[in-house]
Image (cartoon, grey):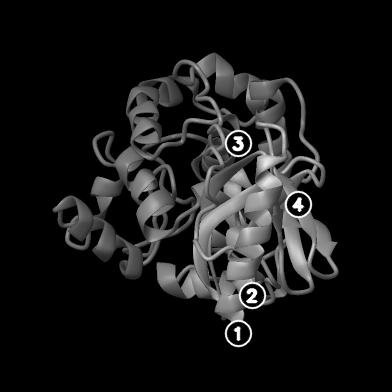
């Protein structure tokens, strides 16, 4: 029955597309309670909810979070200019998992040039305690950002705001007062044998046997990159302006620190772009309010989907 409905919808769509201006194509959603989100990620803010099947004008599509429904699954999201957001293609009445004849949306342009000491001092006034150490570490930190595709204003702002609160952007800092063997070290304040072990295995170094390697100029920035992209997948949360989820991914319980980091995130975006966008999320869902530091990436991702709703 669903296949027949989709096939029929496809025929209808085909007729509509032919009569539509070249810059847009008309499609039909199915189901009720389908969310239009600010970006192509389940963590993005909901800007509208469609009460039932709706005709949508789509100008482009982009790849984002995988959405699976009874009719199939898709990683593609349709951009709807009139609604100011994206709908997962999984809820568009077509037999394919990607919209036919619709161009891919342009990706955010990279921010030109490396981050400098003057940049971080302007972004985070009063938070750079040891400029000479920060300056020494910046070449390796900029390389780690390039390797991690931290190359847009939102991603740079989230990463740098996190590190300035974790380590004051000092590659060789040890968490004050933490005497544990596997206590916080380096840019990302790597903590726990459950992190030292996998990070060491990833780079082929013995971090469990020599945890102070996490303080070294050689490894501090790559370890931060590993945590951001391998142990967690944090760039999409930055893309969605969801600093609450970024903070949860770093792995500490929700509290006043979340707002402080979110304020730094906003300050960094303002410096990099000249304004603070609407839709920044500073809070966490109830599912992510606790200490998530010991969760695997798949466990964290699953927890983050709790209560996500359609699309």
What residue did someone put label 2 on? 5
User: Sequence order check: which comes first, mark 3 or mark 2?
Assistant: 2
Label 1: few (<14), some (14–19) or many (≥20) C-alpha neighbours in 10 Å: few
What residue did someone put label 3 on? 154
Check if mark 2's residue and mark 1's residue have beta carbons within 8 Å: yes
Image depth: mark 3 or mark 4 in front: 4
User: Sequence order check: which comes first, mark 4 or mark 2?
Assistant: 2
Circle 3 — which element? helix
What residue did someone put label 4 on? 56
Q: Quadrant of residue 297?
A: bottom left
Q: Is residue 263 above or below residue 93?
A: above
Label 4 and label 1: CA atoms lie apart by 23 Å
What residue did someone put label 1 on? 1
Circle 2 — which element? helix
The one nearer the camera, 255 or 65, is: 65
* Res 15 label: none
Residue beneath the point at 57% across and 18% down? 119
Label 3 and label 1: CA atoms lie apart by 43 Å
The one nearer the camera, 170 or 109, is: 109
């Amino acid at each position: 029955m669903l296949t027949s409905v989709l096939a029929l919808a496809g025929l209808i769509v085909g007729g509509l597309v032919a009569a539509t201006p070249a810059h847009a194509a008309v499609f039909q959603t199915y189901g009720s309670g389908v969310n239009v989100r600010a970006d192509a990620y389940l963590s993005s803010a909901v800007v509208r909810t469609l009460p039932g099947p709706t005709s949508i004008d789509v100008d482009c599509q982009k790849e984002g979070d995988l959405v699976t429904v009874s009719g199939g699954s898709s990683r593609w999201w349709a951009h709807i200019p009139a609604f100011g957001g994206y709908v997962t293609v999984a809820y568009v009445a077509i037999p394919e998992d990607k919209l036919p004849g619709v161009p891919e949306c342009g990706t955010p342009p990279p921010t030109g040039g490396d981050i400098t000491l003057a940049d971080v001092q302007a972004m985070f006034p009063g938070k750079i305690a040891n400029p000479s150490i920060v300056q020494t570490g910046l070449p390796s930190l900029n390389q780690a950002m390039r390797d991690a595709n931290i190359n847009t204003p939102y991603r740079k702002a989230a990463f740098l705001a996190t590190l300035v609160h974790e380590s004051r952007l000092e590659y060789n800092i040890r968490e004050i007062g933490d005497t544990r063997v596997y206590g916080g070290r380096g840019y990302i304040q790597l903590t726990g044998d459950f992190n030292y072990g996998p990070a060491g295995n990833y780079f082929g170094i013995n971090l469990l046997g020599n945890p102070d390697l996490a303080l070294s100029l050689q490894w501090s920035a790559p370890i931060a990159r590993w945590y951001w992209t391998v142990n967690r997948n944090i760039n999409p949360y930055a893309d969605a302006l969801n600093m609450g989820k970024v903070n949860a991914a770093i792995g500490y319980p929700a509290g006043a620190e979340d707002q402080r980091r979110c304020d730094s995130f906003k300050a960094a975006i303002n410096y990099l772009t000249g304004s603070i966008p609407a839709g920044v999320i500073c809070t966490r869902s109830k599912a992510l309010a606790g200490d998530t530091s010991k969760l695997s990436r798949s466990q964290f991702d699953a927890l983050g989907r709790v209560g996500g709703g359609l699309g």
